[in-house]
Structure formats: structure tokens, C-alpha cells
Image (tube, coloured by chain):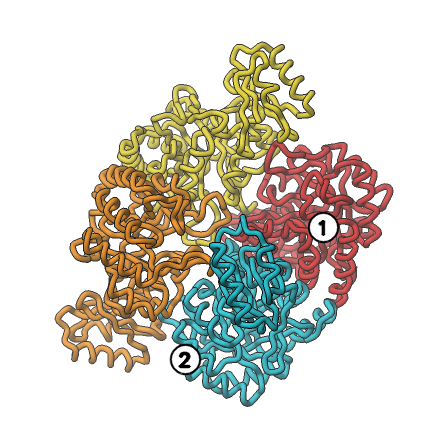
Chain colours: A orange, B yellow, C red, D cyan
Amino acid sequence: MIIRMKADASPEDVEYVIGRVRSLGLKAHVSDDHGQTLIGLLGQLQALNQTALIGLRGVEQVLPLRAPFRLASRELKPGPATISIDGVTIGGTRLVVMAGPCSVESPDQLMQTAWAVKEAGATVLRGGAFKARTSPYTFRGLGEEGLRLLAEARRETGLLIVTEVMSPEQVPLVVRYADILQIGARNMQNFELLDAVGRARRPVLLKRGMMSTIEELLFSAEYVLSHGNSDVILCERGIRTFETYMRNTLDIGAIPLLRELTYLPVIADPSHATGKASLVRAVSRAAIAAGADGLIIEVHPDPASALSDGAQSLTPQQFAAVMEDTRQIAQAVGRAV
Amino acid sequence: MIIRMKADASPEDVEYVIGRVRSLGLKAHVSDDHGQTLIGLLGQLQALNQTALIGLRGVEQVLPLRAPFRLASRELKPGPATISIDGVTIGGTRLVVMAGPCSVESPDQLMQTAWAVKEAGATVLRGGAFKARTSPYTFRGLGEEGLRLLAEARRETGLLIVTEVMSPEQVPLVVRYADILQIGARNMQNFELLDAVGRARRPVLLKRGMMSTIEELLFSAEYVLSHGNSDVILCERGIRTFETYMRNTLDIGAIPLLRELTYLPVIADPSHATGKASLVRAVSRAAIAAGADGLIIEVHPDPASALSDGAQSLTPQQFAAVMEDTRQIAQAVGRAV
Amino acid sequence: MIIRMKADASPEDVEYVIGRVRSLGLKAHVSDDHGQTLIGLLGQLQALNQTALIGLRGVEQVLPLRAPFRLASRELKPGPATISIDGVTIGGTRLVVMAGPCSVESPDQLMQTAWAVKEAGATVLRGGAFKARTSPYTFRGLGEEGLRLLAEARRETGLLIVTEVMSPEQVPLVVRYADILQIGARNMQNFELLDAVGRARRPVLLKRGMMSTIEELLFSAEYVLSHGNSDVILCERGIRTFETYMRNTLDIGAIPLLRELTYLPVIADPSHATGKASLVRAVSRAAIAAGADGLIIEVHPDPASALSDGAQSLTPQQFAAVMEDTRQIAQAVGRAV
Amino acid sequence: MIIRMKADASPEDVEYVIGRVRSLGLKAHVSDDHGQTLIGLLGQLQALNQTALIGLRGVEQVLPLRAPFRLASRELKPGPATISIDGVTIGGTRLVVMAGPCSVESPDQLMQTAWAVKEAGATVLRGGAFKARTSPYTFRGLGEEGLRLLAEARRETGLLIVTEVMSPEQVPLVVRYADILQIGARNMQNFELLDAVGRARRPVLLKRGMMSTIEELLFSAEYVLSHGNSDVILCERGIRTFETYMRNTLDIGAIPLLRELTYLPVIADPSHATGKASLVRAVSRAAIAAGADGLIIEVHPDPASALSDGAQSLTPQQFAAVMEDTRQIAQAVGRAV
């Protein structure tokens, strides 16, 4: 159950309501939603008489939530929510496309890609500075040098930056350079890291774990939201199944299903989902047709020489073709790029 | 390796080539592709000198196939293939939509659905007379009575009929009533049944098993094709994964991947893939956007009272909305309904 | 709900009870359990007053079953059940070991294997005459010739025979040669075949589908049981998962779980579960330790030249070592080989 | 490829060899294995002439490793390795049993459990102070207070302590209290954390991720080993599959398979693998029979009131029964508890 306080409720009102909640033997979990205080009630709720709370001063609504995740639930906000960052809106009529190399490798590689994806219509540049790699013997990223190159690319092209953060102690560093903090699939249940980005005042791109259920994804979003950071973008990037022809299996149904369950924006990652450049175009079309709010796509000026994920990276030309297709499909579903 | 004989090769030419193949210590597997004889070579092919075969009279082509499936491979026919049945073409620019109830339940239920789906734009009526059910205690279909009702619906509406056949001995019976023989997901590796429909001269709708890889799907198609029945339509209907919010997980990437691997038409079944009526619309759009040649959708005049699969069945009104969406997406990808 | 009639109930008693069931608006499903008639009740059971049935003449028990599968449920028979075939008891204190080649290939290969496995302690000879193969281009078995060789091996060695039956029309043929009819994993939901072996008066070895849940396995057993054939042996043979190092993943927990849910005997197939001969020994020990009633193992005199499943076949020497281990573990869990 | 230096090689020898490796255009990855320096070679190894390295002073062996993981590979050390901690040896003839509550909840609960598991034969006490929980609204552990209680339990009972560490910055804290650092399944690919425990001089219990392949598990071990921490214990705790009757599916074959691939000790966690207390006993027997070096089991004085994982926790009495069974099976496979 969640109590939504009015926008003009005073701190005293909030304190008073919290006191009442506690006097009923419950815990109060306080968070903020764009200026409105939300008070989550934890404990034995079955016997609770809501009328004891509805009439209190400053209370706008008492929500009897059925979903086990609360702050992410569509029961809380009818949604969809939009997240605005420096003039780019995520979750609205206009789709967002994030594109760039798997890893930041060099100034040339990054700038060349950045200009190419901007020209084709992307508004966010992706690129890994810290890389989560299965083997310790593969390239693990340029680290802070990579972050500096991303910031440089933003200055020159005006693109927003999304990049992965891999541990709580990296958060302050990455926040200095990135517009959106990415939580990678392998860290979707790194709860200390979720707490840390929840406390950061920066939008979060939360990728679904490759073997995580939709409910677990929403619970991980809940970790971030519960610290008062309400700008969470979900990303379907394929799940692990028995099929081995592709790297993963994009769960296309998850896109409309997340629409039903949550108000948070949802984008798709056809690069990791398929692992094959030749399939990215068709799967991008499918994701937009299913209702995704955008895409995140790996692009490299020379995929064959990429230090990571070359097999699934598009050339700038292939990416431009994907953008063209995306425009067609977007129009067919009443949206635009 | 496969030898494609010329269209005007004589039976003697064919015999002579087969003799040569055998004299090389190989087995010859003979089949027919719209009037052209195909001779598949089985055995120790590594050391084979193709030039010994290329020059023979009547030989059009010697194909060094790399794919383990042969007759279904795009290496054999650049494709895509089209299958024409009584004026309906499957695999061409125009999409095919098959729709109808999970089970044939009564004359009223079937005729009402048939007229509704026809009006909305479907050209094939689906409906189960023999039902594969997990539990022996649930409705297993009307049997031959169901087939008669389907034939009656065809006479009245002009829709083609697709219905499931569940055992080799049912094939002659079902062939008398159906335009397309459906192999259900649970029978995708019922090899005796695949042999039986391969010998029948009737198009086959082969549904991917919920536990089957794409390669296994193509091998099952190969069983049918190897008997000379080249009219196989593949159907992606969702695979079983760890996710439980939906009945299955539609493998959207399988659609463009099958396009790369085979010339056979591919349709999608969003009803079984999701198991939830509310998700069928978005997933239908996605499948068409990904390049599917059509859809097969469960429609029932009153889903709540359906004897099977009610939760995933659309009402006629919902189905009409799906068709409307499908038209929009089809146009965006250069196709039509 | 199931009514168990007394062993000495007359046909008139049974008829009378069935009539009462029907007069309550329910369907009656009649089957036989070693001479006692079982009447399963289907329909709206919620409102049913059991006392209307408990007092009727000939009624021994009215069982309010909670499990969705009924005849297989431990609620029906406390079990465990034993199945006796020509002096071999399956499901008792003594473990049963079935062993032999994947495919029957030749008289020599079969007889050599049969004597070897008998000497090592097996009491049932396995061997495929009809083979379910993913590709139509691989060896599909010797057919009836293979069955004749199996019968010959039985005559000479006294071993019982278990072999796969792949379609309803093969049942009468296979029944002439085999002591136990095997339903392969790919046919676990071939419901027409389950009906057919249910009608045959011959014990059935039902292998779990590679992507079937335990509940689905029990429902497939239910198909066989519902025709009055109560001699069903379940077989855990590994399920399909994302892991690719092994062919499948043996679901070891399924063995004690099936013990809780059903009274039917359960054996394990470490050969198909692992796909690697080097792992069969350890997994066999594990299955027995977990409570399995026996094992089914692939043995070939020369695995490297086997026409199918060579990588997972044991040599006779390796098999003897497995038997030695099995004896040790059997003793540790209070059983014997 | 890995160069193993002799135990008495001088630092100058090591430097010289590293120089030669670099002069060949390769990178050198240096680590320590119980006093012997290992130099891993990274780069284009195909063309490398090993004889250029074998004769150098101080070189004991040049190992042409085939496995992609190197330091964990059985090709490097024939193994099995043993890890000794305060008189407890893991990986030898004697099995290790770790037992205790999922979460440390209170002094009473912990001490009661500690004495009970010690009496039954466990030598390591498990208990979570920091808990990885899917939902932020569930109990997340007592934190440092929990660690203090564990240390207190060690002082009183003499049991070793294993407890989970969830982020790099927690490592120094947990190292002060724990004998073995546990990496939980959700953090198996938290690479920053793996680096951090690799740098700590403390044995690591690395649980397999529920979505991770065996190769990925070994690569994660490689992260720890590559920092010179060679005391890694692997733990099979069940993987996520389509089956839902149990919480996870214990991959029993992984135990002998890991034996083939690595020299590191392997234990099994039947509590998380099954999620059902009633199945823990049989699955424990199976794991030992398959060759595991030990078990980790959840025990709680009153499972019904546990703050986490109650359904899978054993009572002390049930745990004593498991230990009794384990002794029987251990003896049957030539080991002891």
C-alpha cells in the first residue's frame, strides 16, 4: 500500500502521517516522485483500515497496490512517464535511438562513430569505458580515459552520453561524465550498485539480466526508485534460452507486457539480443512495432577490427538503413524518430 | 551435396546419374521439386570430385551444400518460395492471415467465427478437430464431426481450411477435409507423422516445437520435403523459457534468421506465443515488421466460454483491430494483407 | 475426485454408482487397477456432497484428489508400486538395470552386448529397432529385423527386452517382440501413441520430454493409466537448458520429487542426460543415491563405430565398473542390484 | 599458453622471461601459485615457437593450454587441490559440510543453530549478514552486527565462518570476520567484486550463477586466481530452467564435469537447488555420490519463522539425518565426513 501526499503537503503533514503509520505497527518507506512524497507501507497490511489514513491532512491518495513491485507499478502512476534530459525526451511520442561502439577504443573510432550516428538520427551516444567481460584476458575498457573521450564527443556533437557503471565506487566518477548511467545485464541484481545509482541524481538505463524474469527486472527498478531516483529506463536485451543460433532470444512480448505493468519507458537492444549484425535490422523494426520507446544499437566504423562485439556491430551505413526502417515503422504506429 | 537435374532431363538421364553416384560409393536420395529431379548424395563426400558429375547429361547444377539440412536450405533455392492454394498465395508480397477458434466446438461457434475473420480479411480458417491436450481429462476435440463442420464453413465462406493431424493413420481422413495439414508443436519431432504428411500431396503447416532449435525445425521440414512434398510453411509459435509471465517466448529473431537459412515461407502464432489476448496485437505487429509472411491467430466469439485456450483468444472485434494494425505495418515494410 | 470400488464389487454395483455420478451432472471415467474399478469424476465438483457417494454398495473409498493428475497420484495409492515381468520386479528393493546399444545394428553387435550386460548384472536389454532421429539422413534403425534380433537375444540370454515404439500402428508389431514398450522423449506428448500403448497390455517405459515439466510427465502417464494399463515406469533422462557442455541436464531433484507425487517407479538415463561416456559413472551413482529404482544405460562393444550415440555409449568394461559402483551406492541406501 | 617458473627461480629469472615474452610481441600476465610464478601469454600465439622459451633459466614448464580458462584448468595442475583453513581441509578425502541459517537473525537463532550443526558434524558455519534480495522490501540482513554474531559463534564453537560479501568496499570489513568469502550466485559476474576478493588473502566460495554456464563459472574463478588468490571453492547451486516445481535445477553432471576441467574443489548447495526442505536429503546424497567435496545446507531452529528461505531450511533434526546419510554415501565412494 502506498500513500501519495499532495504536492503542497507540508513537512509537518508528512511527519504526522508517518507517525500514524508507525502507530499502526507498520514501517513507512518514504520516497519522492517529482515533488510529491510517497509513503510506502510495509508490514501486516491485511487488517489495515484504510479509512484511518485517507482523511489525514495532506494525503492525496491511498493506493491498495496488488503488484509486488510498488513504485514501478502502473497502479501507482497511469503513465507512461517521460524522462527529459537536456532537450531529449524518452518515453514520449518521439523514439530515442542510442548508438555507438561496444567499447570506446580510441579518439578516432569514437568521434567517427559519434558523427555518423548523429547524422543518421541518434540522439544518445553509447560506448563502454568499463567493460564487463566473461574472461579476464579480454579487453576490459579504457577506464576514465574512455569517459573523457565520451565527454569530448558530447561537447563536439551535442549527443547525450550513456555508459556503464560497474561498482558503487565508480558511480561518482561516471556521474561526472555521463548523462545516463547504464546498469549492464550481468549487474541487474547487483543490489549494492542499484542502491548507489538510486542515490545518484542521474537517469538510469537498466538492462534486463539475461536470465531474469520481468518481475525481477521490475524489482531491480524498484531498488533505484526506492531511493527517490524516478528516472529509470528499462531495456529488453534478450534472454538466455536453449537456442544457440543467436546469442540470446529477444523477448518481444516483454515490451507490451512491461507497458501493462509499469509506466517506465522501455527500449530494446537488438545487437545483444541477436549477436548477429544481419538480424539487427529486422529485430529493430519488430521492437518498434511492438511499442518500444527506442533502441540501443552497437555501431562501429570497422566491425571486423572491433575489440569487442564485432559480430553484432553495424557499420554506419547499415545503421543508417536501420534508422530509415525505424522511421517507417514509427510512422505506422503513430510515432516519430 | 545435391544434384539438380534439368527440367527436361529424361528418366534415363536420371537413372544414369544415380548409377554414377552409387558407383562412387555414395547413396542417392531422389526427390522432386516442381518437376525437377533432385538427387541428394549421402556418404563420404569429402573426397568427392564434383567434376565427375557436373558434365553428365541432364545435370543442371551440383550444389556443395554446407547446411546440414539440404532440401530446405537457401543454398538449394535462392527463394523465397511461394505456395499457391486455390488462389491464395503464401510467401509472396501479400501476407496470409489464418484465424479461427482453437477448437471447433459447434456449428454456430464455427460459422460465426468464420464469417467474422473473413470479413476482417483472413483467407484461411483455423480450427482444431483433433486436439493435443496435456491432460486426458480436458476436451480433445469433436473429431471427424469437427472436420465436417470445417468443410461446411469452407463451402459457405470460401475460406481455406487448416487443421491439425495427430497421427499417421489420421492423415487420409484429414486430407479429405483440409487444405493445409497442421503439425502441432508437440508433434514436430513425431517422425512417423512427418513421413506420412510428406507422402500426402497437401501443403503442411509445421509448427516449431516449444523445445526445438531452429536447426531441428529445419530438419523436421526436411523429413516432409524428402518425400517430395515441397509445400511446407514454417510457424514460429514461441519457445519455452524460464519466463512464466507469458505462456511461451516468441523468438522474434527466428523470423529473419529463417529467411537467411531457408526459402520456405514463415508465419508467426502470437496467440500461443504469448497466451494472453492483450499482447496479441503488439506481437502481431512485431512479427510482420520482422518479415513474417503471415499470422495464425485464435479468435472466438466468446473467449470466456471457450473449451480451450480462452485466455489467448481474441474477440472478432479485437481481431479486426489486429488486422487493421497489420495493414499499417505491412505497408511500412512494402507488403500488403 | 475418484471412487475406488471394492475388489468384490459386482458389475451391477459399478453400474449403479456410475448412474448416480451421472445423475449428479458429472461424467464418470472408468478404469481398472489390478482388479479394482476406479471411477474418476469429471465436471463441477466444487458443490458435490461426497456423502451422497460414500455409502453406496461396493464403494471402498471416495478420494478428494488435489493433484491435477489423478490416477498417477500418490494420493490415490500410497505406493510405491512394483511391476513384475517374468520374474523381474521393478520398483522394489532390488534395482533394475536396463542396458544395451542405442540402435540394434547387427546380430554380432547385439549378442555381444547382451551377454556382456547380463554378465555385469543387467536384467533388461535395451536396443532401438525404430529410431527417432532429428535428421532424415541418419540411420533410422533396422525396423522389424531389429525386433527379431532382440527377440533372439532374449531367447538366448533370458534378458527382458525394452524397445521404442514410435506410432500407434507400430504398437501391435512391437508388442509381439518386446516386454516393455518405450515411449521416447520426443514422443512424450504424442497423445495418440500414449492412447495406443495405454490400450496395449504391456508395461510402458515413459521417458520425460527434454523440455517437459514434471507435471506434464505425470499427465502423459495419466493418458496410459486412463486406459487401464497401470504398469508405467517413468524415466528422467535430462532436460534441455542453456548449458551446452553436456547434451542435457539431468534433473536430479525430479527423482525424489516424483517419489512424493506418484507411486510409479522411476529410473534414470545417465547416457542421454550427459551425452558423455566419461560422466555416466558419476551420474549413475547420483541417481541411485537420490532414490531411483534403476538405470537405463547405453552400452556398445565399440562405441567409436556406433551408428548412433557413440559419444555417450560405454564399453562393456566401463559398464561393469558402473554396475560395481551402483552396488556400493545401492547398499548405502538400503537397496540391492 | 602458460610458463610455470621453478620454485627457486630468482626475480631476475622471472624478469628476463617476461622480457623475452614481450620481445615476441606478446603480453605477459604474471600470477603466483603457492610460491611458483606463473606467466600467462596473451596475444598471437599461433606462430609462437615454444622452444624459444623452454630452455630459459628458471623455467620449469611451458604449457600449451587448450582450455580458454587457464589458471583454473586441470591442464595446469593435475589436482585435485586442497585448501586448508585452521585445520579444516577442503578438497581432500574428508568431505566438508557448511551449514547454518540463510540470514543471521539474532544471537539466539545463530548460536542455537551453530551448536546443532557442529554436533551433527559440520565444520563451517554459514550465515548471511548482507543479503542479496530480489525485492528491496524484504529483510536485507543485520549487516556488521551479523558479522559480529558470526565471529562470536566461531569463538564459542570453533566452527569456521563463511558469509557473503556483496561489493568491493565491503571486502575489508568482511575479511575481518570471515574465514571464507562467499560470492553469491547473483554476483558471479560482478567482475569488480571478483577482482576485489582476488586481491584479498582469504579463501573464496564462488557460487555458480543461476544463469551461468560452466565455462563462465570457470572464467569467474579465473578472475580471482589471476590476482594470485588460488584458494577458490566452486559451488553448484542449481540453474534456472523452465521447470517450476523446484526453485532451481541442480546440474548434477556439472560435478564430475568440473572434476575433469579443473583441480579446484567443488561443493553442492541442495537447499537453493531445490528450494524444498523435503528434497534436500536425497539431493545431498546424490551430490556426494557424484563426487562433490562437500555440501552447504541451510538450517534454522524454526524454519517456519525464518526471515528468509524458510521453505528450504532444515530443522537441526533433519540436518542430522542428512549428515547420517552423507556418511553412508561418503563411505560408499571411499570418502569420509
Tell me whether marks 2 and 1 sit on the same chain: no
SS assignment at label 1: strand
Q: Quadrant of the C terminus of chain B?
A: top left
Is residue D193 shown left or right of residue B49? left
Residue B147 appears in the picture as rendered: no
Residue A85 appears in the picture as rendered: yes
Residue, disc 2: D143
Q: Residue A283's image quarter? A: top left
Residue, disc 1: C297
- Are there few (<14), some (14-19), or many (20+) residues within 10 Å of tag 1? many
Q: Position of residue A123 (x, y in %)?
A: 22, 50
Which residue is nearer to you in this view: B304 or D196? Answer: D196
Distance between mark 2 and mark 1 Cα atoms:
50 Å
> What residue sits 56% from the left and 22% below the top?
B228
> What residue sits 76% from the left and 64% below the top?
C328
> What residue sits 54% from the left and 55% below the top?
D68
